Amino acid sequence: MTLFSVLMPMRNAAPFVEAALLSVLEQDVDLEVVVVDDGSTDGSGAKARGLGDARVRVVPGPQRGIAAAFNAGLAEARGELIARCDADDFYVPGRLKWQG
């Protein structure tokens, strides 16, 4: 099965990140989510880690903006296919299957 790496750059997204992650984790594909915490001060990283799902990895970001955070996530990705989800966005069911 093909591994998807979903990259999620994040900074101060505490109100949204849990729902965004759950929408990705509900996809019916083999995946990992690389959350790049780019200097959050609102507990966003703790919320992401708090899901307790081994498919989610939270890594520190370079704190130089979203493009640099995305590149940091890309360097950590292990998947054959790369997708992106903002920390305040949601995936519809089946999205990665359609796009894979």
Image: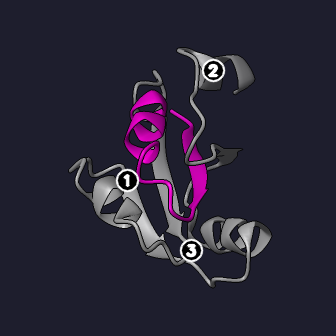
In the rendered structure, the answer to whether residue 48 lies left or right of residue 1 reads left
Q: Which residues are magenta?
A: 1-24
* Image quadrant in which you'd find residue 73: bottom right
In the rendered structure, the answer to whether residue 55 lies left or right of residue 76 reads left
Could you tell me which residue is drawn at 73 percent across and 66 percent down?
A: 66
Determine which of the numbered discs, if any, sits on residue 38 in the image. 3
Query: Under tag 2, what secondary structure?
Result: helix
In the rendered structure, the answer to whether residue 40 lies left or right of residue 84 reads left
State which tag comes first along the sequence, 3 or 2.
3
Q: Are marks 3 and 2 in contact (CB under 8 Å)?
A: no
In the rendered structure, the answer to whether residue 75 lies left or right of residue 99 reads left
Amino acid tagged 3: Asp
Query: Under tag 1, what secondary structure?
Result: strand
User: How dense is the environment of label 3, judged by Cα within 10 Å: few (below 14), some, or many (20 and up)?
Assistant: many
Q: CA distance from mark 3 to mark 2?
A: 26 Å
Amino acid tagged 2: Arg
Determine which of the numbered discs, if any, sits on residue 56 in the image. 1
Q: CA distance from mark 1 to mark 3?
A: 16 Å
* Residue annotated with mark 2: 95
The answer to whether residue 22 is above or below residue 63 is above
- Picture quarter with the C terminus: top right
Query: Under tag 3, what secondary structure?
Result: loop
State which tag comes first along the sequence, 1 or 3.
3
Viewer-side label of 3, 2: 3
The answer to whether residue 83 is above or below residue 54 is above
Q: Is residue 60 magenta?
A: no
Whole-percent x, y for residue 60 in the image: 49, 78
The answer to whether residue 78 is above or below residue 62 is above
State which tag comes first along the sequence, 1 or 2.
1
